[in-house]
Amino acid sequence: MNTEQLDLVFKFLGVVVLVLVILFVATWGGLIKCGSIPYFCDLYDLVLGSPRVAIVFGDSGLGNPEKLRELLLSPDTVNAQSVDLVHIDRVSQGNLKNYKLVIVEKARVLSFDQMKMFVDYVSGGGRLVWIGDAGVETIEDEQKNYNDVNELKGLVTNPWVRIKETVGEYEPLYFDEFLGLRYISNFCEEKPCNTNPFSVGAIKTEPTGNHTLIYGLSPILGLKVAKDRDFAIVKQFPNSSNSNIVLTLDFGGSLIGESGNLGKSFPLIVSSGVGERVAYYAYPPEYYVMDNNYYNLITRMYYGMLGRN
């Protein structure tokens, strides 16, 4: 092989390496999904390691972290290689960086700093699944009557809006805008619920049915819930360009609850953010399996959020 041929080979290899670097960076940043390129997920895992998943949980709220972990690890569903259960008290910004996907559930009470930590995690390239009523209550030290402060009256309009008081000023955190959703209530706080699973309506996919989080799911299915396996009632902001409703619950008529007329349909799965690196599940994904046998939604959550179509 002469000098010109060697030079051509090195230039070709240089181009290949450059393309691979661009693909790795774009995949890490959520701009492309590794599953969109044949065998690239395998190469990506070989270089960076199998994706680590953290299920962050607290002491109250919707969700069953142990069951979710069991389903993610099961060879019959996802067969994930690394899923850690981490209590919110042991979570820091530093150790979140070790995880490709973070799932937050059974964490109704969260502080301003804890919620901001997850926003920063996503800003750094992470992928986040937020479930049910996580973060709708603040810790006792942060509970204040903001109605007594004129400048804050128009800000704290939703449980996911938080205000941190610092010396002489207030720092807002609009977690509702981060999700593109307004939290209303939990279903069983609005209507009496039975201990045994009972039907509440039909779940409907977005028009194409091709979204990665629900791909392969029947367009219309029934949904059963139970008193101890409840779901959150949320509403999308009408002018939200940040969120995409992927799955909807249709009651077939208006839901009249303790808070009045809440409407007839509610988002169940919503994706948001650049590269759809954030997903909100009003109904914990493990409940879809426990009461409805919809295993597909666990599988699609894992592969969809990690870009593995």
Image (cartoon, rainbow, N blue to C red):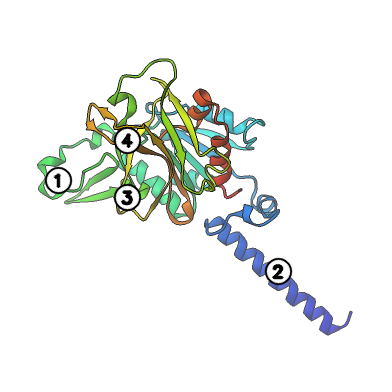
Rendered location of residue 62, percent (x, y):
40, 28
Q: Which secondary structure lies at badge 4?
A: loop
- Give the labeled residue for mark 3: 177
- Give the labeled residue for mark 4: 264
Q: Is residue 216 left or right of residue 103?
A: right
Type of amino acid at the residue the image marks with label 2? Val
Type of amino acid at the residue the image marks with label 4? Lys
Q: CA distance from mark 2 to mark 1?
A: 57 Å
Q: Is residue 38 above or below residue 62?
A: below
- Do residues under tags 4 and 2 come within 8 Å of each other at their CB atoms? no
Q: CA distance from mark 3 to mark 1?
A: 18 Å
The structure residue drawn at horizontal position 32% and vertical position 29%, both measured from the top left corner, is: 186
Badge 2: how crowded within 10 Å, few (<14), some, or many (20+)? few
Q: Which secondary structure lies at badge 1?
A: loop
Rendered location of residue 147, percent (x, y):
12, 41
Q: CA distance from mark 3 to mark 2?
A: 40 Å
Q: Nearer the viewer, mark 4 or mark 2?
A: 4
Q: Which residue reaches farthest front?
A: 252
- Do residues under tags 2 and 1 come within 8 Å of each other at their CB atoms? no
Label ID, residue 16: 2
Residue 100 in sight: no
Type of amino acid at the residue the image marks with label 3? Glu
Q: CA distance from mark 4 to mark 3?
A: 23 Å
The structure residue drawn at horizontal position 28% and vertical position 33%, both measured from the top left corner, is: 139
Label ID, residue 153: 1
Badge 4: how crowded within 10 Å, few (<14), some, or many (20+)? some
